[in-house]
Image (spheres, rainbow, N blue to C red):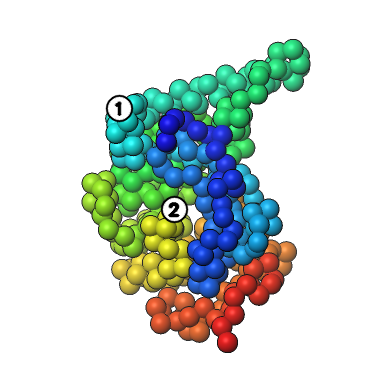
Amino acid sequence: CTNPITPELRAIDAINPYDRCFEEAVAGGVTTCVTGPGSANVIGGQFVAIKTYGDSVENMVLRFPVAVKAAFGENPKRVYNGKNQTPSTRMATAALMRKALIEAQEYNEKLEKGKADPEKMPERNLGKEILARVIRRELPLKIHAHRADDILTAIRICREFKLRYTLDHCTEGYLITDKLKEALSEDCEGIIVGPLLTDRSKIELKNLSFKAPKVLEQAGIEYAMMTDHPVTPEQYLPICTAIAVREGASEEGALKAITINAAKITGIADRVGSIEVGKDADIAVFSGHPFDFRSRCVLTLVNGKVAHEEH
């Protein structure tokens, strides 16, 4: 990490389709994932929705880009404090975010002027170009935030710039459900919870709880669940969901959290997330209840093709 603002980075340039994680995912019944740069940078780059089966990124991509990654909290300030660079505080993270968004607004204004007068077209800047799409609401910000105050800072900035966004991890979101509901009634497009099957590896995870899905559901908030692979390998998504059910979430709500809700929140529900005419034929068949840890995925179809089969 040499620059905290890197919206020009593209997930598709870093994916190895021959990584064993894809084989393990499809064997676990996971047919689609949304992946991208991590949370070391304030703005990290572009996310992609990708199938877990294929021999090249080009024939695995479902949609690109689907979002631009942003991060609040411990990660950016820890990384850059160690380099004696900004941001080393939460205030600096928010300030850098605003600065980048303002520059994207200005770049977008120049683009509009350039359409009318080619001599006024600005020099191409890949980072500002992608952030201009965020400013135009063509793409959402995919925001990493754990602590309640970081979640609220993210909401504050997105309101300020009238951005579309999702709240990812949202570890303490269950403590501020009223604020989440208010955000969801505006431009927040969804809450993605997780990883929950992990250690409290940093102070901002002290309120990590498998009861979060139940609390969100009882508050009337639809949510999705993530494993944050490789923090928790993605093939264990059904196990994470099963534990959430054990802790009070409904089976139906939990199933939606890893199927249709996840697809809606990430903007790909026209292709995946449910079995409907016209959608991709992505189907996982289990030997028993998918939330029973003893069940095995015996058949996985991706785009109607057998991607995994147990004999």
- Percent across and percent down for residue 249 are 37, 67
Q: In the depicted view, which residue is nearer to us: 141 or 215?
A: 141
Q: Is residue 192 left or right of residue 147?
A: right
In the figure, residue 57 lies in which quadrant?
A: bottom right
Q: Is residue 24 above or below residue 217?
A: below
- Percent across and percent down for residue 121 are 70, 17
* Residue depicted at 37% across the width and 49% down the height: 170
Quadrant the N terminus occupies: top left
Mark 2 Cα shell of 10 Å, populated few (<14), some (14-19), many (≥20): many
Reading the image, the residue beneath label 1 is 84
- Is residue 66 in view from this perspective? no
Kind of residue at disc 1: Asn
Q: Nearer the viewer, mark 2 or mark 1?
A: 1
Q: Is residue 203 above or below residue 309?
A: above
Kind of residue at disc 2: Ile
- Percent across and percent down for residue 50 are 60, 56
Reading the image, the residue beneath label 2 is 192
Secondary structure of the residue carrying numbered label 2: strand
* Residue depicted at 49% across the width and 41% down the height: 69
Q: In the depicted view, which residue is nearer to us: 176 or 200?
A: 200
Give me the C-alpha separation between circle 2 and circle 1: 32 Å
- Percent across and percent down for residue 238 are 44, 70
Secondary structure of the residue carrying numbered label 1: loop
In the figure, residue 78 lies in which quadrant?
A: top left
